[in-house]
Every structure is written in structure tokens, then in C-alpha cells.
Image: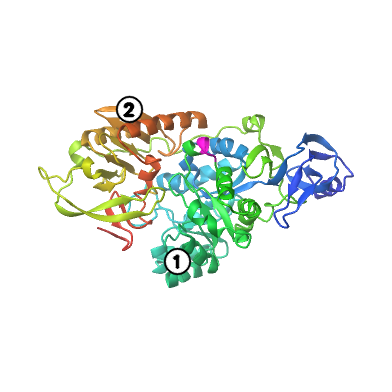
């Protein structure tokens, strides 16, 4: 539609393309409740607070209209479905813009993975925006399937879906002025650079922010969030399937801070999306914590738009993108209908999007292995990864573990399970073994190719034979999740797109994950989300102790043990 058409429809001289009649617009700037119709021309709002007539009209009497929600940082791959299925799953829940970092698929197949998302963004109903993956791999202490340098990123930077540079995870490299990090920061210093600096404070935090990094989703305490706000960062409250920071950060979200706070999910799987929700669930819980509802909805929309330079959205106002969520209940964030870019998010709209061809098939290349591959020599004081439930931070524990027949064996009585990472990109065949506490596992093994961020094979088990079986099955199905016990595969989900995403519909993936969760619990696993928890145990840029295919990593020293 032309500017002239917008003016004419906004003035009521012509019927609007679409009119929402009888609702109340909640202004995210003044807090006012504005009665009157909402007129839409093409993908733009052209009028509010007056009576309009439209070529199409929707009766929204009694409903409150708020701007579409913006997920400010996520990895679509963690939903285990394609971008198209993710769109179909969360857009009806009010998410009209998602800012993704496709560094999961990029760590497997490189720039082709980012191109897959850029292409997908042109066919989703939601506005899928992309931040270019800044750290592929996340550190030099892991083997990934690909590496992206500054030159590769710059070939993608001019795509209209691109906002800037995604989470800069290698914060030790930034502080040390590592040349590779500096090259990327210089190349993108005039654009948006997303942050990732868990527990960083004081002068180190000053230096990190001084590099031009503007947003941060790794704050896990109120004090950490407040310091980062005071130093100019926008804080993204995160509530994923493993990283659950909402309860700790809710007291920080007030009418005063709301313009500088946003919401994100980072990594949220279909179990939690289906059973709890997405950003709508975060909104409900924040209001339940006593946060001011206007502050919460502002953080979910206008504040997010401002933080990432999306000036065309975040408010129901003339000239803004027609992203509108209709609520039958504000406090419970009960979404009745969603308009996304002027189109109602219904079954017909999703059916008309077309299908994208999968990428990253046949990406799991298993080195020779058997049960003995998981034996671990040594004795005495041994580093053990200690899980913090609901967090991706881990404890660096030390345990005395005796050797039996030359092997430090798992011990269910002490909740000491074997954790192993197997390089699966066909580069070196590394196998690293260690110990983890917190799964509660009594028998069997679980395995996954979702293993942040290098996405090698990660296994946790009490039985070496079941661990070997799980690894072999992952290779056979092209990656995914498996549960093995007593020499049998008890449950599985194939994720053949890069070992990360299924070609199935969201509902089928959810059903498979329910079976996997039940099978894991039959092994004694006590964690709410064992597979994503396992994935983060291999990410060597999150304190304090992690494991990659190259061995155990002391993250505080940023060094292999």
C-alpha cells in the first residue's frame, strides 16, 4: 500500500483494509486505555481512537489490545522444530517478532545454517529477525563443525532480516583484546551487538560494555541486573527450559526500569511451550510476582523494540507495524486472537506459507567406539560438574573417586554419573570423559546431539554399554535425543536437520519429548529438563566447570584441565 492510501484510510476517506471494532487499546507510552476502532492498511496501523469502516472487520468488543510481543533473544533450534513450525507454535501466543541467533546450526554447517534462517524469515508469518552468530565456535576449547570469521559474517550483514551481531559469548577474549574478537567488534561497532557476560562485574564489566555491547541476557541475580542497568546495558529477563532467571529478576522490573528491560526465552523446548506457554507464560508469572502489568507488557513490546532499533513496532499507533495481540484477560495474558503484519494468525495464514527444504542432513559422523571408550583412568581428587537446577551455571566440585580395575566408575549412591562428549563432525574423533552430579540417574544412559554450542554428542550414563548404544543410535537417526537401558533404546526423537531440528510438526515433537521425559525418569533422572540441561554442560563460556570433546574446562580460568 502507498503512503497516500495510508493517509486516506487513516483519515477515514476510504474504507480501511481491516478494522478491529469495539476493543480498548492499551497505550504503552502513557498507560491510557483508548476506546475506538483500530484501522489497518496493509501491514500498517493507520488509525486508533475513532470510528472506522473496513473492507474486513473483526469484532473485538470487550477485549484489550496490546502490541505484539517481541522475544529479544532465542535459538529457534532449541524448540527442536523448523522456523516454520516455531512460527505456527508461538505466533498464536502473541509473539509477532522473534530475534534469533542461529549459532546452533551455524556451529554444525557454518554460514549455510544462517542462510537457512534468513531464507526462512521471508516465509514466516511472524517477523523473524536474525542476529549474526558472533562466536562460532564459542571458544577455542571445543571442536565444532564450522567456524565463522568476520569476512563470512560480513557477507550476510546486508540482508534485511539482520539486526546486528549476536551474543558475544567469548567475554574473556573481549577483555584480553583477542585479535579475532576485536576484528568482529570493529566490523560491527556501528550496529547492534548483543551481550553474554555471566557474573561479570566491576571494571571487567566496564571494559566489556565499553566494547560497544548493548544488551545482556545472562544476569541471574537482581544485583547483577542492577549493576548492568546502571552501566547502560538493557537487561533481557530470560526464562528458558533450563535457564530460569525470572523469579530472581522480577523485583528489578518496575515502571522506572521497564523502558530498559525486555523478555527473552533463549532456549525453550516444546514441552514447556505446549504445557506452560512462551512469552505469554513469562507475562503471567511476572504479573503474579506483583510486577506492574503496564511495566510487564511494555517490556514485552515497546521496550524490546527500542532496545533493538525496531522503531516501527511496539505501540498500537498510526504508522506502526500492525502487530496486535487481543487479550480477553490482561492479568492472565489470555490471548484470543493475533494480528501479525496486518494478517490474522490463523490456520489459513499458516497453511499458505510454503515449505523450505531441510539443511544439514547426515551430519553425525561417529568415531569407532565401544563400552571401553568411556573408561576413565586415574584416582583421588577428581573434578565433578555440579548441576544447579534451573540454571546453566555449574559448580566446580572435587570428589575422591577410587579406581576399580583401572577405571573411575560411576557411583549411583553418590549421584556421580559418567558424562562424555564425542566429536561427531568427522574432524578428530575426540572422546572426553568426566563426572557430573545432579541427574540422580540409577541406571542406563541418555544421549543428545543438542550440545551447546559445538553440538557434538553428549552422553550421561551409569552403564557404558548403554552409552555406546545411545551414541550409535544417534548416528543412525541423524542426531536427536535417545534414552537407553539394559541394551535397548527406550525412547528417541530424531532431529535430522543438523542434529538439532525435526521435520515433524510441533505436536508430534511434543509427543516424542513426553515419552523421552518419562523414559529418563525411569532411569532415576530427577531433572525437569534433562536433555537441555545436558546440552549446557558442554558450553565452555558459562562458569564454572564444563566439558567439551577436548576435556574438562575450568571456565573461570578459561582453560582445559
- Please tell me which of labels 2 and 1 falls first in the chain: 1
Q: Is residue 48 visible?
A: yes
Determine which of the numbered discs, if any, sits on residue 111 in the image. none
Foreground mark, 2 or 1?
2
Pointer 1 residue? 182
Residue extent of the magenta highlight: 273-277
Task: Report the quarter where the N terminus lies.
Answer: top right
The count of marks equals 2
- Give the Cα separation between the discs numbered 2 and 1: 47 Å
The image shows residue 514, relative to residue 173, as above or below, that is above
What is the crowding at mark 2: few (fewer than 14 residues within 10 Å), some, or many (at least 20)?
A: some
- Find residue 151 and report its horizontal and vertical position in percent: 48, 57
Instruction: Say whether residue 261 is magenta.
Output: no
The image shows residue 515, relative to residue 47, as above or below, that is above
Q: Secondary structure at mark 2?
A: strand
- Find residue 217 and report its horizontal and vertical position in percent: 49, 56
Position of 349 with respect to 278 (left or right) is: right
Pointer 2 residue? 490
Residue farthest right in this picture: 13
Amino acid at each position: 500500500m502507498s503512503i497516500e492510501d495510508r493517509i486516506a484510510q487513516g483519515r477515514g476517506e476510504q474504507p480501511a483494509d481491516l478494522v478491529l471494532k469495539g476493543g480498548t487499546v492499551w497505550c504503552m507510552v502513557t498507560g491510557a486505555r483508548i476506546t475506538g476502532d483500530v484501522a489497518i492498511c496493509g501491514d500498517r496501523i493507520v488509525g486508533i481512537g475513532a470510528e472506522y469502516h473496513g473492507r474486513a472487520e473483526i469484532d473485538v468488543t470487550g477485549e484489550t489490545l496490546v502490541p505484539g510481543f517481541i522475544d529479544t533473544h532465542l535459538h529457534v533450534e532449541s524448540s527442536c522444530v523448523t522456523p516454520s513450525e516455531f512460527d505456527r507454535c508461538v505466533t498464536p501466543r502473541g509473539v509477532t517478532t522473534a530475534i534469533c541467533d542461529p549459532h546452533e546450526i551455524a556451529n554444525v554447517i557454518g554460514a549455510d545454517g544462517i542462510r537457512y534462517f534468513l531464507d526462512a524469515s521471508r516465509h514466516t508469518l511472524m517477523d523473524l529477525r536474525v542476529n549474526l552468530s558472533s562466536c562460532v565456535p564459542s571458544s577455542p576449547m571445543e571442536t565444532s563443525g564450522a567456524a565463522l570469521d568476520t569476512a563470512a559474517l560480513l557477507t550476510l550483514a546486508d540482508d534485511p532480516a539482520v539486526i546486528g551481531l549476536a551474543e558475544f559469548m567469548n567475554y574473556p577474549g573481549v577483555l584480553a583484546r583477542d585479535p579475532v574478537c576485536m576484528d568482529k567488534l570493529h566490523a560491527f561497532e556501528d550496529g547492534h551487538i548483543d551481550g553474554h557476560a555471566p557474573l561479570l562485574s566491576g571494571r571487567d564489566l566496564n571494559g566489556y560494555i565499553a566494547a560497544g555491547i548493548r544488551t545482556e541476557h545472562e544476569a541471574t541475580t537482581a544485583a547483577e541486573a542492577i549493576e548492568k542497568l546502571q552501566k547502560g546495558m538493557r537487561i533481557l529477563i530470560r526464562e528458558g527450559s533450563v535457564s530460569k532467571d525470572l523469579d530472581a529478576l522480577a523485583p528489578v522490573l518496575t515502571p522506572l526500569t521497564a523502558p530498559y528491560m525486555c523478555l527473552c526465552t533463549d532456549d525453550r523446548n516444546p514441552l514447556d511451550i505446549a504445557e506452560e506457554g512462551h512469552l505469554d507464560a513469562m507475562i503471567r508469572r511476572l504479573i503474579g510476582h506483583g510486577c506492574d502489568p503496564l511495566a510487564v507488557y511494555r517490556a514485552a513490546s515497546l521496550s524490546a523494540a527500542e532496545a533493538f532499533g525496531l522503531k516501527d513496532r511496539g505501540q498500537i499507533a498510526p504508522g506502526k507495524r500492525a502487530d496486535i495481540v487481543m487479550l480477553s484477560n490482561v492479568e492472565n495474558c489470555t490471548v484470543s486472537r493475533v494480528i501479525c503484519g496486518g494478517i490474522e494468525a490463523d490456520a489459513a495464514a499458516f497453511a499458505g506459507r510454503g515449505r523450505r527444504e531441510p539443511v544439514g542432513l547426515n551430519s553425525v559422523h561417529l568415531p569407532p567406539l565401544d563400552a571401553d571408550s568411556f573408561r576413565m583412568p586415574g584416582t583421588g581428587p577428581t573434578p565433578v560438574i555440579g548441576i544447579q537446577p534451573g540454571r546453566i551455571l555449574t559448580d566446580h566440585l572435587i570428589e575422591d573417586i577410587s579406581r576399580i580395575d583401572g577405571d573411575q566408575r560411576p557411583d549411583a549412591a553418590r549421584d556421580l554419573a559418567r558424562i562424555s562428549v564425542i566429536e561427531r563432525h568427522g574432524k578428530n574423533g575426540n572422546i572426553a570423559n568426566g563426572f557430573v552430579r545432579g541427574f540422580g540417574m540409577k541406571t542406563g544412559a541418555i544421549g543428545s546431539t543438542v550440545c551447546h554450542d559445538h553440538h557434538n554428542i553428549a552422553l550421561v550414563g551409569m552403564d557404558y554399554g548403554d552409552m555406546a548404544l545411545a551414541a550409535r543410535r544417534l548416528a543412525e537417526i541423524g542426531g536427536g535425543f535417545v534414552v537407553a537401558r539394559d541394551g535397548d533404546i527406550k525412547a528417541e526423537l530424531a532431529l535430522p536437520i543438523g542434529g538439532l531440528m525435526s521435520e515433524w510438526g510441533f505436536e508430534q515433537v511434543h509427543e516424542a519429548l513426553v515419552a523421552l521425559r518419562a523414559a529418563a525418569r525411569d532411569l532415576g533422572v530427577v531433572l525437569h529438563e534433562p536433555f537441555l540441561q545436558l546440552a549446557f554442560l558442554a558450553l565452555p563460556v558459562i562458569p564454572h566447570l564444563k566439558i567439551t570433546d577436548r576435556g574438562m574446562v575450568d571456565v573461570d580460568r578459561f582453560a582445559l584441565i
